[in-house]
Amino acid sequence: MPLSLIFDFPTIQGLAVQIDSSLTPHELFEKPIGTALAARLGEPASVAAERILPAPPHTDYPLTHAQKRLWILAQNPAASVAYNMSYSLSLGGALDITALRQAFGLVVGRHEALRTAFITKGGEPRQQVRSGQPFHLPVLDLRGESDAATAAGREIHAEALAPFPLDQPPLLRARLLHVAEHEYVLLVSLHHIIADGLSLNVLIRELHVSYAALCANIAPDLPPLTIQYKDFAVWQQQQLTGKAMLAHRSYWLEKLGGELPVFALPTDRPRPPLQQFSGGQVLLRLPVPAQEAVHQRCQEQGVTLFMLLVAALKVLLHQTTGQADILIGSPVAGREQVELEGQIGYYLNNVVLRDTIRRSEPFTALLQRVRNTVTEAIAHQAYPFDLLIEELAVTPAPGHSPLFDVQLNLIPSEVPSLQLGNLAVAGSVTNSQTTIFDLNFMFSDGSLGLAMEIGYSTVLFDAATIEQLGDRMLRLLTAIGEQPEATVRLLCALLEERASAAEKAEFLAAALNLDEEF
């Protein structure tokens, strides 16, 4: 899994740029993104316009809706490590271990989320902020091992698979492996219930500032935190009856009203009655020429790459399942308020993208409908996904996730450089070999081509099946780049080995005509 999945530009900000590239820098960086988008889309002011204030002091606080769902899932032993976030950082140089331990302690002391215990009170989960304690940073010396790299690999894997007792904070672990002279591996793990991907950006940045200051015997220059995660949880509850949130609720209840389809992906093995979480990954890449053609089609159609990828994936899923009503999910960062910048916490939200496939229409027509779907979903993204599940009274079919089994995300290709004082740092995500979806498509648009990583359930699929599925997706994107006016029926036929010579000739002729126009 590439590090850029974690050290990324806020998803909602990226989607804002994708949806409307005319948003000014002021709107992007000086105003909450949700508010700027809502104004452009003619929607009522978002809940982002409401300030988050410190909550009155109590012994415990409510969970956000997203946290509550993770807490419920964490009670299932099969999902005990599915929501672990584990990373390894290679450190080169003269490391001051005491300063690093103290730097972790400073960060844990600043962010209440890292000191939160999840308890049960009156049969309901509650979060309780605990006082700070000296941070424990164990050091394992591997320099005497015959193969220190292999030994480190075992430790990295074991760390990723170690469960978190949610009632025993901190839900942040760190271990240091001493692999050679002036060479270390720092293992960092967090439970998703108290952090998201953007939280790691904050953690690493504050560790860098704190470690450098401690090494220089000066006080770290870190901005004060005006609120904490518990304040967001209380604020979210208060917003649920507000006008803006009720408008978002109405939109989603209408969009996802009626009978929801049970997604029928053909699998290599029968789907178990209870959802399992073992996962794997397959990485493929769309060559640069095809990538450039796709970008050209996006410009011509006035859509973003994200929108085109959503439309293409829906065609692929239709061709694979034969179903026309296609629902997929996509994550948004959920940090619309200025107060949430620099926070560690679980702010991630999901939006559902629902469209009906019409085989007789050109792909460009589907693309414009998907454009509207994405734009509307982002305008209404403030409504908690997990509350939406409750509102819809969704009971997932056995072995399925609620609402969608396939997720798509487009992430930035640029990975910010990592720093920890004056040490040389290289980072990577530790793969715990788990997944919470049948399929998770992650795209990154880079100079080497469009990278596509497909996370998949190993309980349902073989790697070869996913490689074939990924190859069909790349072929589909290539075909769209060559002829976006091709009908959905024709694009589906081109993905099947039984496509007739007449169908292939029809597509080729249309593509040649398109080339002549340009």
Image (spheres, helix red, strand yellow):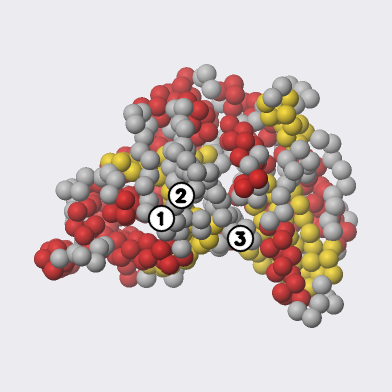
Q: Amino acid at mark 2?
A: Arg
Label 2, label 3: how far apart the Cα atoms are: 23 Å
* Disc 1 to disc 2: CB gap under 8 Å: yes
488 left or right of 103 in image: left
Location of residue 64 with respect to 343 vertically, above or below: above
Residue at left 59%, top 27%?
A: 236
Return the residue nearer the eye: 85 or 422.
85
Q: Which mark is residue 322?
A: none
Q: Position of residue 283 (x, y in %)?
A: 47, 66
Residue 22, position as x, y percentages in the image:
38, 45
371 up-or-down from 204: above or below: above
Q: Secondary structure at mark 3?
A: loop
The quadrant of the picture occupied by the N terminus is bottom right
**Position in image of residue 226 (x %, y %):** 71, 33
**SS at mark 2?**
loop
Residue tagged 1: 267
Front residue (pair 419, 266): 266
**Residue 428 visible in the snapshot:** yes
For disc 3, the neighbor class at 10 Å (few under 14, some 14 to 19, many from 20) is: some
Q: Nearer the viewer, residue 160 or 248?
A: 160
Q: Earlier in the sequence, mark 2 or mark 3?
A: 2
Quarter of the image where the C terminus is located: bottom left
- The disc, 3 or 1, on the residue closer to the chain's N-terminal end is 1
Amino acid at the residue labelled 3: Asn
The kind of residue tagged 1 is Thr
**Residue 377 position within the rendered picture, expressed as x and y whole percent measured from the top left:** 40, 37
Q: Which residue is mark 2?
A: 271
Marks 3 and 1, how far apart at CA: 23 Å
Residue carrying label 3: 431
